[in-house]
Amino acid sequence: MSAEAAYLFRHALLRDAAYQLQMPGDRARLHALAFGLIEDFCGGRVPASPPLGGTALATFVPHATDPFAQELADHAHLGGEAGDSTGVPAEAFTLYLRRAAEIAAAGYRQQAAQQCWTRLAEHLAGRSKGEALRQAGTAASVRGRTAEAEGLFGRALEEFREAGARPNEGMALSEVAALYRRTGRVDLAERAIEEALALSRETGQRREEGNALTNLANIYRETGRVAQAERLLEQALLVHREVSNRHSEGITLGNLALVYKETGRVELAERTFNQALDLHRAFGHRRSESLALGNLASLLMRTGRFEEARAACGRSLALALEVGDRSNEAVALGTQGRLHLLEGRLDQAEPLYERALAIHRETGSRRLEAVVLGNLASLWLETGRSGRAEEAFRQALDIRREIGDRDGEGVSLANLAQVFAETDRLPQALATFEEALALHRRSGNRAFEGGSSCGKALCLLRLGRVREAAGLWRDGIGILKSVHDEVEVRTRREAMIVACAKAGVEPFAEEEGDGGGQVDALRG
């Protein structure tokens, strides 16, 4: 131990010993004195806030005591034990503890926010206690402490129901539904959000109705009901704009952009992502900005703009780390891994995928766990580890079926079909590609349909069905071009050239009536 560290250690011990030597009453009066001096220095006590859990939106008004809110709460708590006129009123403790919780949450110090809200709940009752628990659950959820969050939300719901606070119950149900959705309990999530939607309409809470519509649409999109999801998101957007909920408007625009991306409307998706980002930046919603940037990075990567994708992904990761959002952190790490993979840096891609996978498992994000498992398996397949790849693809498929992710199920089936093709199980590959295509067409995911069509075509080629293969490959590459998936177009062309050379046939034409050799331009 260095001399400076030894001094600090001994100083702390001496300080604590001296503190404990004071009589309890004297200690309490000293805390009360410190409390009064800090308040006087800051110009007096902060004004009381509106009741916690009220349905009216409260605007946070800064005050000179804000940098000392946590200290003031601690001094108030300990100074209240003086038991005489020198003590601090009990309401001062909850006033400053709530202030400390709100300041921590606004500053993205999620652990401190969770601790303050949980501590505050111990000194409240009814609707106010429920709201403190709900806020603590939100902070725990962002931190990736899923079990803690679920317990806090459950306790909040009990308080709201006992107090008959129906609007607050609806808000807590929305939080519970989001947690269920993230952890793969889709049926529970859908029931909870439908209940929240009904409560918001029953109590006339238009703001919460808009949020519930957005959350229900997310479940529809992830379970293959894409057209229904788009309709709900459009309804939600109207509600958010009606009540001037700009944060939820930005989130809903980002979710609409995902629908546009998945259904092949890439230019509209990019414009909509940027509209969402403009709102998040204008109003300082940094966590939502991180998520939208991550989704935009994925689109930029798909369209071959790797430098722009790298910049967007880097910014998304930096924001996720700043706000303590473990889920967005893992998504950004996975996107960085995908970029390294596409640019041939496989040794750098694998550890990023492994880090992302560890976080998703830690936070219980089942759908995202399946995504990263699939990406890791693709890397293993590319590097000759087909057995390990097949096992991971099957794990991803099991997860997606368990959570009802129909679009993702199609992706996993297509990936497994590719393993079967590369390990000479062609009839099994062909049948599995057909299963995948049926799911892609049902969900309207044009990019996945195009990729799987090209994959199935090369199976047909190897089975000697050349004319059928050429037609299906042309259809698939046409779909990929229509959705501007430049990376997949290039990958599928290169695979087709190699497969045609092995089969001793001319490269397939990309347009009806083409002579077939235009793809040689890739070799320059």
Image: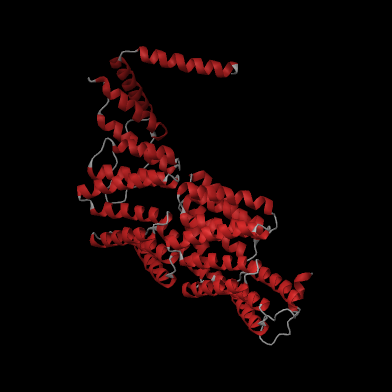
Residue 72 x %, y %: 36, 29
Residue 238 is left or right of residue 199, and the answer is: right
In the image as oriented, which residue stretches furthest toward the right? 524
Residue that appears at 39% across and 45% down:
147
256, above or below 70, in the image? below
* Residue 509 placement, left or right of 238: right
Residue at 39% x, 60% y: name it: 186
Q: Is residue 32 visible?
A: yes
Look at the picture and state if 435 lies above or below 78.
Answer: below
The C terminus is located in which quarter? bottom right
Q: Is residue 424 left or right of residue 437?
A: right
Please name the colour scheme applied to the rendered image. secondary structure
The answer to which of 104 and 512 lies nearer the viewer is 512
Tally of marks: 0
Tell me the quarter of the image containing the N terminus: top right
In the image, residue 329 sits, relative to residue 124, either above or below, namely below
Q: Residue 521 in the image: x percent, y percent?
A: 76, 74
Judge whether residue 207 can be spotted in this image: no
Q: Nearer the viewer, residue 299 or 470?
A: 470
> Which residue occupies 62% across, 74% down?
454
Q: Is residue 345 above or below residue 233?
A: above
Q: Residue 73 location, x and y as percent?
A: 34, 30
Nearest the camera: 42 or 136?
Answer: 136
Residue 507: give x, y in percent of width and height: 73, 78
Q: Looking at the rendering, which quadrant does residue 390 occupy?
A: bottom right
Q: Nearer the viewer, residue 57 or 23?
A: 23
